[in-house]
Structures are given as structure tokens and as C-alpha cells.
Image: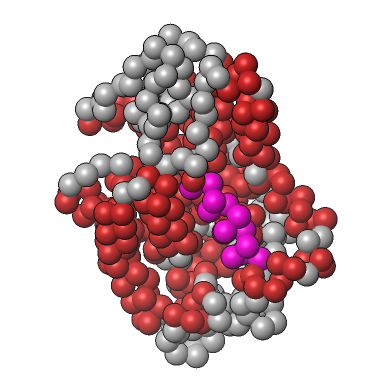
Amino acid sequence: MGNRASGATFRGMSVRNESSPSSALRRFLGIAVLNVLLAFPLLYALYKHYDDAQAPMDTVAFMQMAEEGPASVPSPVRYRLLTPALVQAMQVLPGYGIPVDFTTDPATQKTFFHFLILNFAFTVAASALLFLWLGRRVRAPFAWAGSLLYLFSFSVVTANLIPMSDAACHLAIIAALLCLDRAGISARVLFAVIGIFGALAKEAWFLVLAPWIVVSSWAGGDRKRLNTLLWMLPALCAFALAVWCIPQGGGQGAGSMGDAYLGPEAYDRVSGGWNLLRVFRPGFWDRSFVFHTLLANLPLLAALVAWAWMRWRPAISLRVRVPMNAELLLFPLLLVFGIALGIGNNAARLAFMAFPAAALLQARVLEALSGPLSGPLGEGDRGYL
């Protein structure tokens, strides 16, 4: 059998060596161009027809934040500084003044257009980095398949391109994971810098990276990797500084870490703030919540079914082994955290922040189902159950 830590491993197949930085850059740019060509019609359709009244999210708050500053919106949105600040800096660029469903005001339409362009660039960059990350674990065609499954996933299509901060957070997550793949102080410094951007994009960056490091260290038996948690301190300090410096909406003064994320002021839609018992309340699991949870993770559920089928069939399980990456544990953990936080359907979107784990299993399953094609396997990682 091939390397135990690789993706779908077949008899007689070798492990590919790590590529050079120039080769990785060429592959990143190539996949980014291909993904742009495939996804730009979606960008145009969203710009033309997106209506916040039909799909209410935090878009109005982010638009207001880009135009009036972070103090004009409630927490936790006002601490997600990165994307609105970049959009504000893009005001010197022209807009695209065609009739759209979102607004008829030219200034608002220009801000909306800049949000979509910036988030589209973030999303495509994240999909290309995901290809590089998967390429160390599976063969290139299946790494691209995983990249496309991410690019056209339910959560990405519905939330990444519109005026929100998910796209920047996704980019910071996959960029940080690529840093974790490499050894050396330079990779850790870069991880810390990316962490600052991730923290200022969306605080969910912490909720993904911290448990990811813990789970991968446990699964791979590499306790030294836990030291990487210390390199998250600059990001935590940057987020704490933002919470301390930005006044609360309505002139209430500076905020606190508790109000920023777990306090009642952060999620005034829910009385009582944090409550883990919501997980056990049947009323919370209504049709809308279950529907959004299934749609957000439908490709992952399909991959899990295929994985179980291959493990159940002896003729397949003896020929190929598809490891179950331990980081998939983040999906139920983040989902339960979102439910306890009381963010409704957004709990499924929070769970999707662990998208690299889902993409890896999906790519491994596709590789296994394809049969032993010619060509080397990816390097693989040590995170498996």
C-alpha cells in the first residue's frame, strides 16, 4: 500500500515531493484564472439581481459600516473591520452603473459593486489556495474538484460575494492552514500576520484555527504543533484593541470582549445570550434551520455516505483506504457553538468555516471512486481517525 498518511492510497503509487514556490505560484494563478472564468457569471447575476429584502443578512450593516464607519453599527459587525475598510478605500475607483435590484441610489450602488468585486477576489483567491492545500494531499484533478466544490457551495454562493465578511475570513483560514504545513520561524511569523488580518475580518477565524490546531495535533501525534497557538496572540491582541478602541453604537463608549461576541448586546435577537441548552430544544430545530444546515453541508454529507459505502464494501476497502480526517470534528463543534450562541440559520454558516476539512474528504472520496489513475499521489497529512 502507499503512504498511510496520504489521501486515497493505491498499490504501487508513489508520493509526490513538495513543489517549489515558483511552481506553487504558477499553479495558484492558473487555478485562480480558471475559477474566475467559471464563476464570473455568478458575480454578475448577484450584482444584477441580489435583493436584501428577499435574503436578509447583515448586508445593510456592512454597507453602512463602509460608508459611515464602524461606530455606526452594532457589535459584533463593527469589529469586522477589514472588508468595509478596503471597500471604503476603493471609493476612488469607478462603479458599474447598470440598473440593479439592490438599490437605485448611485452612491450606494457603487459601494455595493465594490463589495462584490472585493469579495469575489477574496473567494477566488481562497479557492486557489485551497487547491494548493489539497494538492499536498490528493492528486491535482481532485484538488481542483475540491476547490470547485467549495467555490460553488451553498454557503459561498449565498454569503461570500455579498457585502459581508465571510470571504475575507475564508481566505485568512486557508492561508493560515498553508502556513501550518510548513516548518520554520518564517512560516510562523506569516501565520501571525495572517491571523491579524483574519481577526479583523471576522472573529470566527479564532473559532476555526484554535480547535483545528488542537485536533490536528491530537490526530497526528505531534504535540509540538500546539505551540502554534502562541502565534495567535498577535491576532487576539489586534481584536482586543479593536473592541477597546471602537465606541459602541449610540455613543455608549468603548466595548468589552464579552459584549463583542458573547454578550446580549452582540446578539440582541436572542434573550439571555449564550445558552447551550438550545441544542436540546425541539423548537430551535425548525424546518428552516434543518433546511439550511443540510444545504450548507450537502456535498460533505454525500462524501460521508460514499466513504461509509466504500468502507462497507470489502472489495473496495481492501483495494483503497480513504482516511477520515479528524478536523471534520469541527463541523459538529461549530454547529453546536452557533446554536448555543443563538444565531439561528447562521450556525450552519459558522460550521462551514471549517470548509478545508470538508473539501479534503470530498477530494479523497472522488479520488478513491475514480480508481488507480496514473500519476503520483499528494504528500498527505497525518490527520486521520
- Considering the image in quadrants, where does the N terminus appear? top left
The residue positioned 49% from the left and 81% from the top of the image is: 258
Is 334 contained in the magenta span? yes
Q: How is the image coloured?
A: secondary structure
The answer to whether 182 appears left or right of 120 in the picture is: left
Give the x, y percent position of residue 70: 46, 73
The residue positioned 17% from the left and 47% from the top of the image is: 184
- Residue at the outermost left position: 185
The one nearer the camera, 267 or 161, is 267
The residue positioned 48% from the left and 11% from the top of the image is: 373
**Residue 323, above or below 190:** above
Give the x, y percent position of residue 107: 54, 58
The answer to whether 54 appears left or right of 368 in the picture is: right
Give the x, y percent position of residue 88: 42, 60
- Residue at the outermost top position: 374
Res 43 visible: yes
**Residue 27, above or below 67:** above
Give the x, y percent position of residue 216: 40, 49
**Residue 224, above or below 85:** above
The residue positioned 22% from the left and 27% from the top of the image is: 20
Quarter of the image where one finds residue 232: bottom left
The one nearer the camera, 280 or 204, is 280
Q: Which residues are magenta?
A: 327-339
Is 227 contained in the magenta span? no
The one nearer the camera, 239 or 48, is 239
The answer to whether 138 appears left or right of 57 in the picture is: left
- Residue at the outermost bottom position: 252
- Is most of the magenta stretch helix, strand or loop? helix
Res 109 visible: no
Circle count? 0
The answer to whether 284 appears left or right of 254 in the picture is: right
